[in-house]
Image (cartoon, helix red, strand yellow):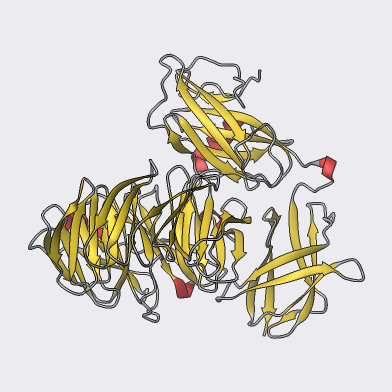
Amino acid sequence: MRRLRHAGRAAAILAALSCAGAHADTFQSSLTATVSLTDGQGNTIERPERGSPFRIGVVLMDAVTGTPPKGMLLQAWIRPLGDGAMSCQDAARAFRVTRSIAEDSVDLNGIVLAQLNRDGSFGIVDPKLNLRSSNMIGAARFDAQPDGFAVDPRSQTAYFAFADTGTVEAVSLVDGARKPFAKDLHRPTDIAVGREGDVWVAQAGTGGLAHFSNRGERLPDVGVGSGGVAIVEASDGSTFFAYAADGSGVLVDRAAGQERARVHSGQGITSAATAGAALVLLERDGMRAQIRFADAPKSSQSVPLAGPAARVAIDPSGTHAFAFSGSGNIVTIVDIATAQVVQAVSVDGAVTDMAFTDRAVYLMLADQSAVLAIDPATIALGRAPSIRRVPIGVAGADTGTTKGLLVPLLPSRTVLAVNAESYTGFILHEEMAIGDVPPMDSVRLRGGVPMAIKVADRSFREVSPGRYETFARIARPGQHELVLTTGIAGMTVCFPIRVEGAASEGRPAKLTLRVTPAAGGLRAGVRQTVFVDVVDDEGRAYSAESVELIVPSLSFSWTGRFIARRDGGGRLAAEILLPRAGTYAVQPSANQAIAPATLEVGS
């Protein structure tokens, strides 16, 4: 039995902590907590391996009633322990004051961004590292541009579909590791992920969905219709709708992983949207929309639109639908309950994407010069809605391909609006819909020109009543501590974690990449040799026969990959050719535990 350190009031929420079911000493409190660690295959572990992702599970239970608490918000991080480390209580107190953790800690709060670029490269961005030299915590490059892209926040995994090869690949959002997920599919083009981590893949070759469990086991396929299949996720996250070119569709409950309703529209569908029980289908001619509900999918109401539309979206409450074309400037707003057009709004540019929060509606202009923010409280029949223009950059080429660059940053009530040409995502707040508030916060997006962004919350999430889970990866071996806190009025509990792979393997605790030109400074457009050293804090070298390097530009859209190998003198050396002058980041492709380097290149 281990005695745990805690801080807070005697009646605070967290009371006891244990690992793998071995309860620690308890103290006077209304709740107990149990912590378990499991590997990627679901096997219980006591000591995670250095650099390997593992799942952390926390179960909270009321010791008196035997029921789980409600409304619990767990904040957590993993910190290394060493000489001079502050106490558990002081670490939690410092976090509550500064909202930051020690540099060497593993943050288990907030979101990460999954960034797919136009050149087929992929990056994992941590917005909390925005002020550092690099905010990328992982990267990958595909041989071809993925046809479909989805993330699973629960397992911290991104999935990519490739129609030509009939495959799906998985990339860990914890460490960037790639692995095959599915093969021998019939032109997979789109992906959706269920609440329990099961994966649904749209197959254009069969007109249906391939279904996989969260362990990758193939489950019975689900037929949809004929022709290509597209998937849209509900704006409230409760369901997704898969529809075929012939007008057939199936609504799937993401929590239960089961079919909820089937639709046969009788006409081709060019776009669809869903929220709650509501379904809005855009007919092939783009001039009419069908409104249906999951409890009566065979009944529909047809609504003529004010202008031609190619896409449709629904707010999370299921109150209004918005139809827009991607090339025209008319947005038709439809009241779903009455099947009436509320407003036909003329805006100052083509709209290509939409996003929602509880108190704001956002529209992305095709040239990425601005986002329009609408206060939903001002949407009413016969009344012009309040629209604010939020500039996010200089107008670029109107390509109509900005779908996926306007995304809600759930669980917060903010939205990320990306200006691809400036490699910047601007964080928009709901207040922008009711006042002239410019964006004050932004995130740098490097490694390529962004094409689509998805968000994964790495915080502890309640996966079942009283059970919270997240994934983590610890790069440094040795003794660490998991810190759980419920806030100022709550309690802090710490749990020791020993990470394998320390002195017995002869590996340094913290590694840094150093890149040195073999002769003079680096020049753009000239093939030159650089020496690559991986060293610890004391300058001791880390042995490796070769290292694959990812070299993204920090000033324009370009990413290169180079291999450093041992030369005749025993040093790691690589020949690199950098196209333009500027600053480049250098990071290993496989081991994200190694701190990256930067290169300055002259003309």
Residue 430 relative to residue 495: left or right: left
- In this picture, is 481 found above or below 14? below
Residue 197 lies, in percent from the top left, at 48, 45
Residue 249 lies, in percent from the top left, at 30, 57
Residue 393, by quadrant, is bottom left
The answer to whether residue 20 is seen in the rendering is yes
Q: Residue at x 63, y 35 (%)?
A: 43
Residue 3 relative to residue 201: left or right: right
Q: Residue at x 24, y 76 (%)?
A: 348
Q: Residue at x 37, y 73 (%)?
A: 368
**Quadrant of the image containing the N terminus:** top right
Residue 502 lies, in percent from the top left, at 79, 41
Q: Residue at x 48, y 66 (%)?
A: 187
**Quadrant of the image containing the C terminus:** bottom right
Q: How many numbered discs, if any? A: 0
Residue 437 lies, in percent from the top left, at 31, 62
